[in-house]
Amino acid sequence: MRVSLGSISNMTGCLLKGSGPLLVLLVAGCARPDVTPPQATIVVPQHWAESGATPTSLDLTEYWQLLDDPLITHLVETALANNRDLAQSAARLDQSRSQLVQARSSLLPSLNASGRGNRDLGDNAPDSFGFSLGVDASWEADIFGQIGGNISAAEADLLTAGYSLADLQRLIAGQVAISAINARAIAQQLEIARSTLDNQEDNLRIARWRNQAGLVSSLDVEQARAQRAQTAASIPALESSLVATANSLSTLIGEPPGRVLFELAELRPIPNPTALAGFEAPADVLRRRPDVRGAEANLLSATASIGVARAQLYPLLRLSGNIGSSSLGISNLFDVMASSVVASVSQLIFDGGRTQAQIDSAEAGARGALAAWEQAILGSLEDVESAAVDQSSAIQRVALNVEAVDAASNSVLLARSQYQAGLSDFQTLLSAESQLLSARNQLVSAQADRASAFVRLTQALGGGWNAREFSLPSEDRTP
């Protein structure tokens, strides 16, 4: 579900600053001044271990288009529009936005109007109606930052919800792309199995003819039958796997099974995307990762909650007042007005340790949020390094398997012609056929791994979402 998140702030960038061989990540600079946040220092390398220093020039925002497969592009974009998990995440974002409005409303006074009309009943009751009107007002002064802390926490919660939606978009897009790539690979392997089965049918006919001619024993016929049956048995398993993958894609794009399987039945090459190399510095990549920024926003919320809990230890000032009038007739209702203003101060003296327990709980929550943020950073660095190695390995495997398929194809041609001429035994042909089948399947797997590694690497680099959609307009900022 592609949602423009107009109320997501870019404020969290203050936690990821620095240059040089070490990047120091300090939380204190972004916290409220009356709160001592948990401190953290994470060493982020200046350069990647598995990549050069030249940044890639490709735009990875919609990286699935670089796969040059119209069906995959259609599936990804449909999933971003219709996926039900994304719809749930978007609803949670709307909830967070509403909760921020509620938190900010606490800065303003509340007004309540009331009106009443009455008439006494009885023999001696006056034959007239009584009327009264009144307005009550109350306001809480945010002297020690409890309301401000709630607003800061609500803003950070909104950030967290927004980046959670962005990260889910990133993950859903990658899941759909990789599933579609796997479906392409399964379709290729299914075609390989069927074409191999046709060749093995020919081998079985040749073996039976030579056996009937008395040139070979029945052993050749039984070996040909066994090989043919093994290949035939792999076809239903591949068909079942293709159906399961297509049905999974149908769920991801938000529709019942059926159409996707029909579209995947068309045999198309496995995507061969451009290899990525020379990534931006680790700190820059971390800024583009919505999961890291979401964990950072969650830390901001947890830190603000400490200040809210501590503010309960300080005095609370409330102002309230009312103005009203009452009379026995509407015409003179406003002749006499009465009003009052009351200022009250309350101070916590004893609550059995409840408030201190809330403070301790908030501090523990901040420490947990800090650990989660650190884990998100470390996991992001791991994703990039591992995906870069996977991409390089898959590219090498494709090149080697191309050579293996070429050699195995030549071996099968030679073995079949020699067997037909009686120059070699059937076991040589069986071995050559098995090597060719294995080499073709391994080539398809390597090609799928190469495309999947590209997807995982673009995901790890923060591709799949548009950061320009995540800005906080001025009307949503805290007054």
Image: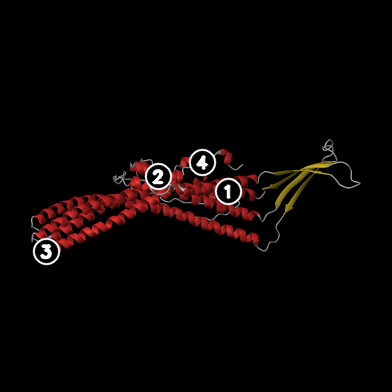
Say which residue appears at 60% left-offset and 43% top-offset: 478
Task: Write down the residue under mark 3.
Answer: 217
Residue type at mark 3: give it. Answer: Ser
Q: Which element is circle 4 on?
A: loop
Crowd band around label 2 with a 10 angstrom C-alpha radius: few (<14), some (14–19), many (20+): many
List the residue tagged with mark 2. Answer: 76
Q: Secondary structure at mark 3?
A: loop
* Res. 159 in view: no
Query: In 3D space, how far apart are the residues under numbered discs 2 and 4 (Cα atoms)?
Result: 24 Å
For label 3, the crowd category at 10 Å Cα-Cα, with few meaning under 14, some 14 to 19 and many 20 or more, is some
Query: In the image, what residue occupies the spot 71% across and 59% down?
Result: 349
In primary-sequence order, the first of circles 2 and 1 is 2
Choose mark 2 or mark 3, whichever is in front: 3
Depth check, mark 2 against mark 1: the one in front is 2
Q: CA distance from mark 2 to mark 3?
A: 56 Å
| Towards the viewer: 49 or 230 | 230
